[in-house]
Image: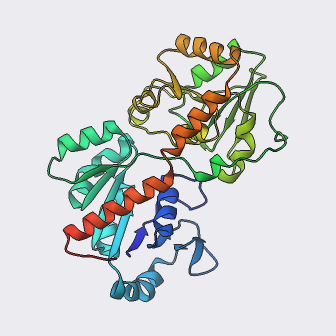
Amino acid sequence: MAVIIYPKTMNWSYMKQRPQQLMTQLGSLGHQVYFENLAPMDREFQEVEPNVYLFTDTKAFLHRKLPELRKQHPVVVWTTWSKLRTRIATVFNPDVTIYDCCDEFPQWAKYEHKMVQAADHVVCTAETIHARLSLAYPEKPITLIPNGADDAFFRIPDGERPGDLPPGPVVAYIGAWAYWVDHALFAKLAARFPGVQFISIGAPYGTSADYSQLPNVFILGEKPHHELKRYLPHIDVALIPFQYHPITLATNPVKAYEYLAAGVRVLSTALPECILMEPHVTTATTHEDYIAKLAAMLSEQDSAERRQARIAYARQHRWVERGIAADQVIRQALEARGSRFP
């Protein structure tokens, strides 16, 4: 198996996103994964999942641990941040570098070309990113690995309604409370449906709108990932209320898979990746279309058949399968470099 290093980009405990999910799956497949954490730790290594270790003392890792690991295993760096190209090469000197292009943040664009050139294999999350990179770099191996559903969301036990969830019908958005959220739409929905509670659960990211004049809007903030299961059974409709923006048009929303795994109805802005999920995800093109479709969903009783169809769709798109695809990319990249491992 390989030693896989995920260089510092975020804290392991910051939400639970693609890097944590993929590294968990690669660890479960037998790779030794070392996740360079941002926050300091009180020990040299912390095993957070089977074969997945956090570390922050990079100097000690490079001088004491990595040389021993290299003797027995090829070293792979898997990065989601193109800005780290130089650091990856000079600090870790891996046998193979995998660049996972999972977002289209404009401020990262200037680093992408050199990162793609330096990478042995490029992975991406969305069809739009795959098409763009394939046209720009026809000689580069590029693999589409979308996001996926966490197995834990298929096994949600019955539980009491969380105390901070107000009574009544609930329409909720779970995810980063960021500038790409269509706050004008969210406010318009709350004003149009005063008898419905509109909930946001997620870490603040940049500035957002003022909802103080809307008594049926509740901004609950970030919750630990494992606690989201307590809220999902009490949501009538889950939202992906994004603006049309370069970031959102190229996003493959993790939250869509998590909503569907829990069997919850989903209404999204008509993003390319969500359109591909129809009919399990309902999409709307304009504010008025969004309002009309939400009205229809709230007026209809959900059926057990449709709920099971959503869950079945999510089961076809689990992180388990994404991890297997990532493992195949690593094997392919190492074999292309002349390295083989069991």
Residue at the spot x=47%, y=84% of the render? 60
- Describe residue 13's horizontal placement relative to residue 24 as left or right: right
| Colour convention of the picture | rainbow
- Describe residue 213's horizontal placement relative to residue 258 as left or right: right
- Describe residue 32's horizontal placement relative to residue 337 as left or right: right
The C terminus sits in image quarter: bottom left
From this view, report whether residue 295 is shown above or below residue 50: above
Q: Is residue 207 visible?
A: no
From this view, report whether residue 77 is shown above or below residue 265: below
From this view, report whether residue 204 is shown above or below residue 35: above
Q: Which quadrant of the view contains residue 252?
A: top left
Return the x and y of residue 130 as percentages of the image width and height. Answer: 29, 42
Return the x and y of residue 331 as percentages of the image width and height. Answer: 30, 67
User: In this view of the protein, which residue sits in the foreground, 116 or 319?
Assistant: 319
Residue at the spot x=53%, y=29% of the render? 280
The N terminus sits in image quarter: bottom left
User: In this view of the protein, which residue sits in the foreground, 338 or 211?
Assistant: 338
Residue at the spot x=46%, y=46% of the render? 147
Q: Is residue 302 visible?
A: yes
Residue at the spot x=24%, y=44% of the render? 133
Return the x and y of residue 289 as percentages of the image width and height. Answer: 53, 12
Q: Which quadrant of the view contains residue 234?
A: top right
Return the x and y of residue 61 as percentages of the image width and height. Answer: 45, 81
Residue at the far left in the pictured view? 139
All told, the count of numbered labels is: 0
